[in-house]
Image (spheres, grey):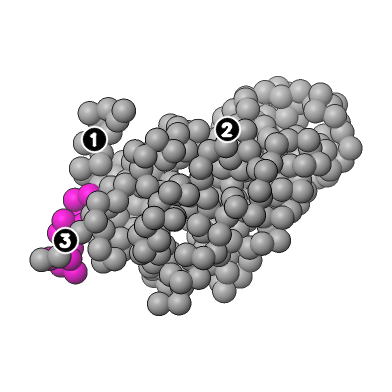
Amino acid sequence: MLSRRDTMKFALAGGAALASPAVVGQAREPLTLMSPFGFIPDFIEMMNAVAGGHLARHGFEPRLLGANGTAQALQQLAAGQVQFVRAAAIDMIRAVATADAPLVAVATSHQGSTFHMISLPERPIREARDLAGKTIGIVSVGGTTDIFLDLILRQANLARDAVRREVTGNSPGALQFIRQGRVDAFMASIVVPVTLRRQNERIEAWSTDKYAPMPSQCYVTTREIAERRPETVVRFLRGMRDSMNEMLTQPNRPIFERAGAQFEIPGIRDLDNVVAVSDASKQELWLARGRENLLRNVPELWASGFEALRRAELPVPRDPAAAWTNRFVEEALRT
């Protein structure tokens, strides 16, 4: 069940839609979507879809909620509390494979991996084989970086216990763990290497795509919604398309300022850094497979992801082809 605080967040997030002149006099469809980790800057395209009126213009009364982790977001989706979530593809695949969750990825927002391996130039970790015998920082035990580390080790024919693991979180401050000798390298999202370089820190960093390319972040719904409400899925994707297109063609500072008036965005006081991270994400993650593939599920990426999981002896869905579809996004991108 949603808490009173969550309900208040829903009401706030839906406020912009109420004022949208494009839907005055029209009955709008309630729509609840969820990010996996609150309202951090990485989810700006979702916040902008609400605050910028993009979903409202496609007939929705949108509400955006931030979960406390991907697992919670997927659980809320499966339980019918929300209609769409953004989730790491690897987490969605695991949910379908291990719990037979009735989920399907209807679009890929990030086709490049958001996660990077970070080390210092004087003690660099440049290849998977360099990991042997090292201590590696991960964001959380059993989380996405933990799984990606397994996949990278497998590529180098290293056992899971070839490295020690320490939880170092997802912050630029994790660099101090290397300097203190607690870890040899750590894994974190793209916000960390971008921020460190803006702070003039010398680092070595490479994406997990180097060893385990796969879709990174996807928009996920239930099979029931996809089957029974296909037009809702198409209109949702049109709203996300419009939000992302605005961010690709317009200055992002005003977009963050508009969203910041409606959502509590961590780090928004350092707006220059927030915008720099967003710019890097758009180029390296949204457009990793070219502008022409924005939002599309790229088949070879999904195939690569399933194969990497199989090689690491991790579960994959019984029917991998049913885990994703381009049926809705192709229609959304046509008009």
Q: Nearer the viewer, mark 1 or mark 3?
A: 3
The image quadrant where one finds the N terminus is top left
Q: Which residue is at the front of the view, 234 or 85?
A: 234
Residue wearing tag 3: 27
Based on the picture, tell me whether residue 98 belongs to the magenta stretch.
no
Q: Main secondary structure of the magenta part?
A: helix
Q: Is residue 315 left or right of residue 277?
A: right
Q: What separation in Å lies between label 1 and label 2 (alpha carbons)?
A: 28 Å
Q: In the figure, residue 303 lies in which quadrant? A: bottom right
Q: Is residue 20 above or below residue 212?
A: below
Identified by mark 2, the residue type is Ala
**In the image, what residue occupies the spot 62% across and 33% down?**
98
Instruction: Give the mark, 1 or 2, whose residue is nearer the N terminus.
Output: 1
Q: Earlier in the sequence, mark 2 or mark 3?
A: 3
Q: Nearer the viewer, residue 129 or 61?
A: 61
Marking on residue 85: none
- Categorize mark 2 by other alpha carbons within 10 Å: few (<14), some (14-19), many (20+): few
- The residue wearing badge 1 is 7
Read off the magenta span: 14-24
Residue named by callout 2:
99
